[in-house]
Image (cartoon, rainbow, N blue to C red):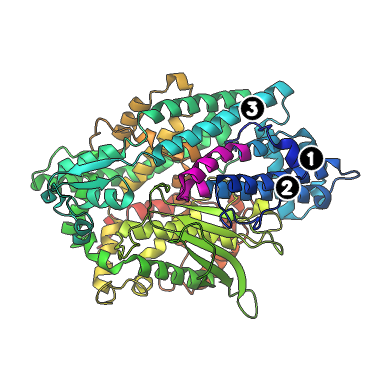
Amino acid sequence: MIRQMAMVAMMGVSLMAMGQVAKPVDPLHAWVGLQDADSLAAWTNWHLAEEQRLVAELTAAKGARTAENTLKLYDEAQFHLMIAGNQVNLMFTTHADKAIRDKAQALTPVVSAASVALSLNQEVYHALSAIDPKAQDAATKHYLERQLLEYRLAGVDKDAATRDKVKRLSDEMTQTSLEFSRNIQDDMRKVLVKDKSELEGLPADYIKRHAPAADGTITLTTDSPDYTPVMTYAKSAQLRREMYLEYNQRGYPKNKTVLMHLLELRQEMATTLGFKTWADLATADQMVGSAVGMHKLLNDADAASRVASAREFQMVSEFAAKQGATNLSLSDSAYWNEQYRRSAYDFDSQSVRPYFPYAEVEAGILKTAAALFHLEFRRVENAAVWNASVHAYDVYDLLAGGKPALAGRIYLDMHPREGKDKWFSESGLIPGVRGEQLPEATLICNFPGGDGDPGLMQYSDVVTYFHEFGHMMHEVLGGKQRWAGQSGITTEGDFVEAPSQMLEEFFRDPGLLQSFAKHYQTGEVLPAAMIAKMNLASAFGRGSWVQGQVFYSTYAMEVHDRDPKTVDLDALLKDGYVRFSHYQFVDGNRLYASFTHLTGYSSNYYTYVLDKVIAVDFFAQFDPKNLLEGPTALRYRKAVLEPGSSKPAAELVKDFLGRRENMDALKKWVNEEFEKP
């Protein structure tokens, strides 16, 4: 898929080409020795200089083209671009110093400039094309074929004027996407609560953390640790509505204009490269293969979940009506689903929060991953990190033969702070290369905890942690490839969520939960009876969840599968909610202004739907009585995670399942709540 790229920045190119950029003290870690914005620029420029040096060596090579004298140099150039891009983004999303965040934002299009220049370099393309694919091993052949496809999708075979236009559009797309993200990052909204009685229903520790000011008012923010509990537990419908609107207006009105401009740029890029729409271009190298394939997937997922979703809403709305609540809106959804679960399943999600203090959850997830994937995690107390709150762990492979073998390093940046990205994500930092470089990756999250706060987590928080850790395990275990460009999560974009969504399902196992879920005050293990109730309650609402994912996917598709001049962001948003949710739309909802997946996944949010289909199909292969230690776990590691992108994603699925994925497991998963005795 076409990346968001920038035009080549001419300033400094000649210096880098001449190798006059000093090598950093630590070329692999941007934050080590980082003193100011200029030092970040120097670190980045060194990697760009190395990329240019390698490309020059590649294009100057004489004689027959081989994997060793051409593809290896190309891959090493990509390695430097990947490191630079990953870590400039890390500094942009996490660094406490605004000047460094600003510099990282300015450097992002410079790194993208090198990427677009490489993607449009005809000499490199012709050199790669001259390599005999028949002489290569299967992984190398796949890598070569995929890189050549990406070159063609980037327009390398177009004339000079077209390639120049692609560069210009890429530059604008990069700058516009950065502007979109920064507008959200800097727009933390606040809701002023005039009396603490408005917080009725919220957990005691939440109320304690939000002490009234001298005038009796309480300030809440749209950061997740403030927002999510209000939407789930606050009895005040008015407070929920206020928080909902503030949360869904982040970045507005600026980002409405920014997003429309981005859609126009993408459409122009698509037509320039010979595609009808951006959605057609963005799916050309994905598992679904085309926008038509995306439409079919979403229609199938809709059909698999629509009846269950309607039944769930009927059950909740009838329950709420008995409590005097009618005409339920989107801002009421989480609260009344929670109340219904309490009544129908005798389960209050607040009751489990004391068993999920952040430190215990972190330890439990590490323990789970260690058992499942045959690994060992060792805390690195003296590791250089970009913030004092970040924890680093070295990962050791217990299957390497003999003593544990170092397999990589992970970083956990898990709590909110000013200037930090507000979402939950995993990011590769350094791609692994077999025999040369171990992979490194990080989680960037915003869970409660830190500064003496036990960080009592909601059920959904822990599921999110499992999800993101699934990405990280893919990054590390898939980081032993011959080529950096096949390391870790470099598969087709619409497969990357499958391993993470699969790991979510492990959260339901009683034995696994009792290994770490302990009361933060008494040490009591989470009772089996409570786990049983939690699992029953958590199965409720899956139809609505799938419908929600189909809604997000459809919205992302529909703003990209037509001429932007015909796109009405607000009308499509409301229409989508009406089609896929039974709750009333809340006027003033501007979700699109903070829907960051529109800049990342662009039209391809459907990834979450396809990968849920794959994930529950994967999980259905495990023995529920022996999830962690049965033979399936090792087979899953070997067949799905370890290959990275050395095979097409469809082959990874088939290697594990013995067939293609289908909707059967999803239908069973969605209707599990209705099949219980």
Which residue position holds label 3? 166
Q: Residue furthest bottom?
A: 402
The kind of residue on which mark 1 rests is Ser
Of pointers 1 and 3, the one earlier in the residue sequence: 1
Per the image, label 2 sits on a secondary structure element best described as helix
Magenta span includes 326: no
Of pointers 2 and 1, the one earlier in the residue sequence: 2
Q: Is the magenta stretch mostly helix, strand or loop?
A: helix
x, y percentage for residue 18? Answer: 79, 42
Q: Which residue is drawn at 73% across and 41% down?
A: 16
Q: How far apart are marks 1 and 3 (CA)?
A: 21 Å
- Which-is-in-front pick, marks 3 and 2? 2
Label 3 Cα crowd, 10 Å radius (few <14 / some 14-19 / many 20+): many
Per the image, label 1 sits on a secondary structure element best described as helix
Q: Distance between the residues labelled 3 and 2?
A: 24 Å
Q: In the shown orientation, is residue 568 left or right of residue 383?
A: left
Quarter of the figure with the C terminus: bottom left
Which residue position holds label 1? 129
Which residue position holds label 2? 50
Q: In which quarter of the image is residue 137?
A: bottom right
Q: Which mark is residue 67?
A: none
- Magenta residues, as a range? 91-111
